[in-house]
Image: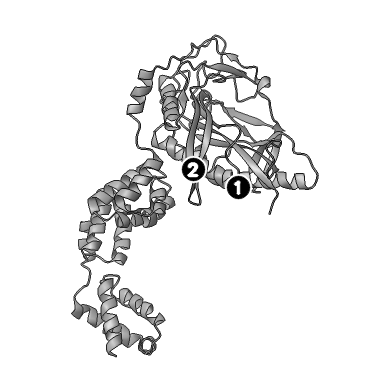
Amino acid sequence: MSNYEAVIGMEVHAELLTDSKMFCSCRNEFGGEPNTRCCPVCLGMPGSLPVMNRKAVEHVIRTAIALNCVINPNAKFDRKNYFYPDLPKGYQISEYDNPIGESGWIEIDINGVTSKVRIRRVHLEEDTGKLSHVIGDESEVDYNRSGVPLMEIVTEFPPDMHSAEEAYAYVTALRSILTYIGVSDGKMEEGSMRCEPNLSVRPVGYEGFGVKTEIKNLNSFRAVLKGAQYEIDRQIRILQSGGTIIQETRGWNDARQETFSQRSKEGEQEYRYFPEPDLVPLDITQEWIDEIRKTMPELPRAMRERFVSQYGIPEYDAGVLTQARSVALFFEQTATLCGDPKAASNWIMGDFARLLNMEGIEIHQSKVTPTHLAEMIKLISQDVISGKMAKELFEEMYETGADPRELAKLMGPQISDESSLGAILDEVISSQRDVWDALIAGDEKKFGYMVGQIMKVSKGKANPQQVNRLLRERVQSS
């Protein structure tokens, strides 16, 4: 067991869902031909002036409310000065000493234990362009992303997280909140949410802090988990061998599953912050905050707890179903319509999730509606179709969006009458004589096999409950 513990802070950048960029009217949209969604403002041309995007400001206020922050009534923008090819002005308009949100917190769950992670600040800035390194020493820059409204959420110091698992739980909980309140799509694969753990290690019981490193621009939950754990282990190995940790920025090589050095870490004084002279300070009134608060939806944790108490589903199910608001709403509508919340949960987390993942789409983009799924669950409970038939019917419904009752008519009814099932049972016993003899001799393992053969011969239409009862009666009478 290691004598060291990790200390982890987190910076999360989230691009905001607005129609236009932060300080100009260029479209805020992912993709497109490089350098086609730019103007003199987001390209930093001399004489161009920024105009603040009100919707972006409201999104950050909305986030600050969701993260239990104190909202600064006089937030202001500053210039963060540094040179990099993807930053055309040579500075970034950001918020420094007067951010919109401060002193917040969220709760995370690890192995059934709830803990609080404090939020130091939630501030608004503009995104940079995107730099791509091509073959050789050449690089290409795309300024389509330059000027996109970007929100940064920074955890408090001293940090509250001490393991890679806590870092993972934090970013997943945060993403759920941001997507629930509609401020960001959270699509990490598109770069609209990037995570940057700042971590160090120290001897257990030591109250000071070690030298920290920052892992830049992690774009998946798995990368957060694996990257943080790798960096923790790397620092411990260095200290145990008598080495010294260097304060630096590191990247994550997903193919090699390891971090690598990028550059020495800048200090705040190197950015030469000063108030942005082209923008007036924000005047965030209590009336404005209250208006935004009225539009806040139920947040993931509250919805999860309500699902457990209202629908009686397990906490695990509720946790999975409330990760995305579209899934939670789909479940709630289905459960209400069919009257069987657990069945709704099983279908959404099982076959439905599998097909959605295969196609790479969200639940609200599928052809299946809550009404259709609820009707299919009713068909099962009414013994119109068997569970095996339902799986076939669901795949057809997923592909076509057809009404489940119409599909059930085309499939034919479930076989439930004893005479028809008895004939199928006789056929299976005749063709599986050795298995049948072993079953009646006491080999209970053969019972499930015989049930499976009956379902196969009936093409999945046999009523499973009836099959089990009739087969058990036949065994007992033999």
Instruction: Answer yes or no: is residue 454 visible.
Output: yes
Check the picture and name the quadrant holding the C terminus.
bottom left
Say the numbered circle drawn on residue 226.
1
Q: CA distance from mark 2 to mark 1?
A: 19 Å
The amino acid beneath tag 1 is Lys
- Colour style of the rendered protein structure: one colour
Task: Report the front residue among 436 and 342.
Answer: 342
The amino acid beneath tag 2 is Ile
User: Dot 2 surroundings within 10 Å: few (below 14), some, or many (20 or more)?
Assistant: many
Check the picture and name the quadrant holding the N terminus.
bottom right
Question: Measured from the top left, where is residue 143 in percent x and y?
Answer: 55, 25
Q: Is residue 101 left or right of residue 254?
A: left
Residue at disc 1, secondary structure: helix
Q: Is residue 144 left or right of residue 199?
A: left
Task: State whether residue 33 is above or below residue 228.
Answer: above
Total numbered labels placed on residues in the image: 2
Instruction: Answer yes or no: is residue 366 visible.
Output: no
Quadrant position of residue 261: top right
Residue in the image at 60% along x and 45% along y = 163
The residue indicated by pointer 2 is 108
Residue in the image at 39% along x and 82% along y = 444
Q: Nearer the viewer's eye, disc 2 or disc 1?
A: 2
* Mark found first going from the N terminus, 2 or 1: 2
Question: Measured from the top left, where is residue 6 in percent x and y?
Answer: 65, 43
